[in-house]
Image: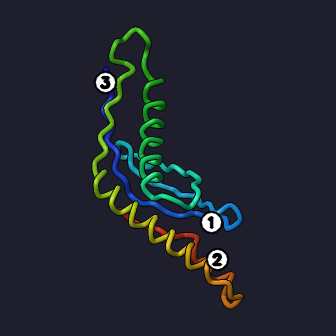
């Protein structure tokens, strides 16, 4: 039987920033058929569009792996999963803007070499959040 899965994106959050590797941890929270799930991935500061494509594909692949293994092999349609991404356009727009704002914060942090408030500026890069 074909499984229909509804995915609704809820929020994205920056969990941490590593200034030595110029990388950050991005956590995306979403609902799968009324159950809440989270995905956390590590990215290098760079192109926001790459992050968007990668996180959406990763979520789709994880959902397919989870639901494809639940069926017997004798059913022809057992391996098919229909994934409906409900608010994908809004998610794409807001995530790209959110990541670009974070990149701007990182850029100003790396350019400013003063010691005044260094720790506060470093900690301000963590726990950035966007709700969809």
Q: Which residue is mark 2?
A: 122
Task: Verify CB contact (< 8 Å) between mark 2 and mark 1.
Answer: yes
Rendered-image quadrant of the N terminus? top left
Q: Which residue is mark 3?
A: 2
Q: Is the residue marked by circle 2 packed among few (<14), some (14-19), or many (20+) residues within 10 Å? A: some
Residue 37 x %, y %: 46, 48
Residue 101, compared with residue 33, is above or below; it is below
Give the quadrant of residue 71: top left
Q: CA distance from mark 3 to mark 2?
A: 48 Å
Q: Which mark is residue 90?
A: none
Q: Would residue 5 be found to the left or right of residue 14 on screen?
A: left
Q: Would residue 17 be found to the left or right of residue 49 on screen?
A: right
Q: Which residue is mark 1?
A: 17
SS state under label 1: strand
Residue depicted at 47% across the width and 32% down the height: 66
Q: Is the residue marked by circle 3 packed among few (<14), some (14-19), or many (20+) residues within 10 Å? A: some
């Amino acid at each position: 039987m074909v499984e229909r899965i509804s995915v609704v994106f809820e929020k994205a959050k920056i969990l941490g920033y590593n200034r030595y590797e110029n990388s950050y941890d991005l956590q995306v929270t979403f609902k799968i058929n009324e159950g809440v799930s989270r995905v956390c991935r590590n990215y290098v500061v760079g192109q926001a569009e790459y992050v968007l494509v990668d996180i959406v594909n990763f979520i789709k692949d994880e959902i397919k792996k989870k639901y494809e293994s639940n069926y017997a092999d004798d059913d022809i349609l057992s391996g098919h999963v229909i994934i409906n991404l409900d608010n994908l356009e809004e998610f794409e727009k807001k995530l790209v803007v959110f990541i670009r704002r974070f990149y701007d914060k990182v850029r100003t942090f790396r350019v400013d070499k003063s010691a005044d408030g260094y720790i506060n500026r470093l900690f301000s890069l963590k726990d950035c959040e966007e709700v969809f």
